Image: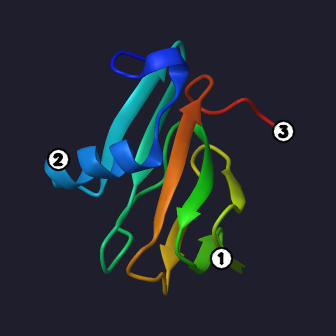
Amino acid sequence: MAGWPAGVVPLAAARQRLASAAPEFVELLRHGSLVVELYAPRGTDRQQPHSRDELYVVASGHGEFVLEGERRPFGPGDLIFVPAHAQHRFERFSDDFSAWVAFYGPEGGEGP
């Protein structure tokens, strides 16, 4: 949690780091198996399945989330769970879309 007092990661500061880093994501916190990033793809979500379970919390914007072929709308404040190795992506998302993403647990996921 280096750089963040009392474990608080302000969204504005995370966005500032993301803008200065230039990729679609920036890592903000690492503790044990937990890794937290801010994710903000532009135009197309190019991510591939991950080897660990993950949670997204939509910080801003709206669109559609596709998980293993099932499509659902999302908006600010929504929580999205993705099990390890699942095909997933954000589609038709607004220009202001960003989400906190937390990767956690063992490689391969925690199971059912």
- At label 2, the amino acid type is Ala
For marks 1 and 2 on the same chain, the one whose residue lies earlier in the sequence: 2
Q: Position of residue 30 (x, y in %)?
A: 44, 21
**Label 2 – label 3 distance at C-alpha:** 36 Å
For marks 2 and 3 on the same chain, the one whose residue lies earlier in the sequence: 2
Q: Nearer the viewer, mark 2 or mark 3?
A: 2
Disc 1 is placed on an element classified as loop
Instruction: Give the position of the N terminus as an image quadrant.
Output: top left
Disc 2 is placed on an element classified as helix
Task: Please report the residue visible at 59 percent of the width from the left and 29 percent of the height from the top.
Answer: 104
Instruction: Give the position of the C terminus as an image quadrant.
Output: top right
Q: Which residue is mark 1?
A: 69
Q: Residues within 10 Å of mark 3 (few under 14, many from 20)?
A: few
For marks 1 and 3 on the same chain, the one whose residue lies earlier in the sequence: 1
Q: Position of residue 53 (x, y in %)?
A: 62, 39
Q: Nearer the viewer, residue 13 or 111?
A: 13
Q: Which mark is residue 99?
A: none
Q: Which residue is mark 3?
A: 112
Residue 97 visible from this viewpoint: yes
Quarter assignment of residue 73: bottom right
Tell me if 17 is positioned left or right of 9 in this view.
left
Tell me if 19 is positioned left or right of 96 in this view.
left
Q: Which residue is mark 2?
A: 21
Task: Please report the residue visible at 51 percent of the width from the left and 38 percent of the height from the top.
Answer: 51
Disc 3 is placed on an element classified as loop
Task: Please report the residue visible at 35 percent of the width from the left and 43 percent of the height from the top.
Answer: 13
The relative height of residue 36 versus residue 22 in the rendered view (above or below) is above
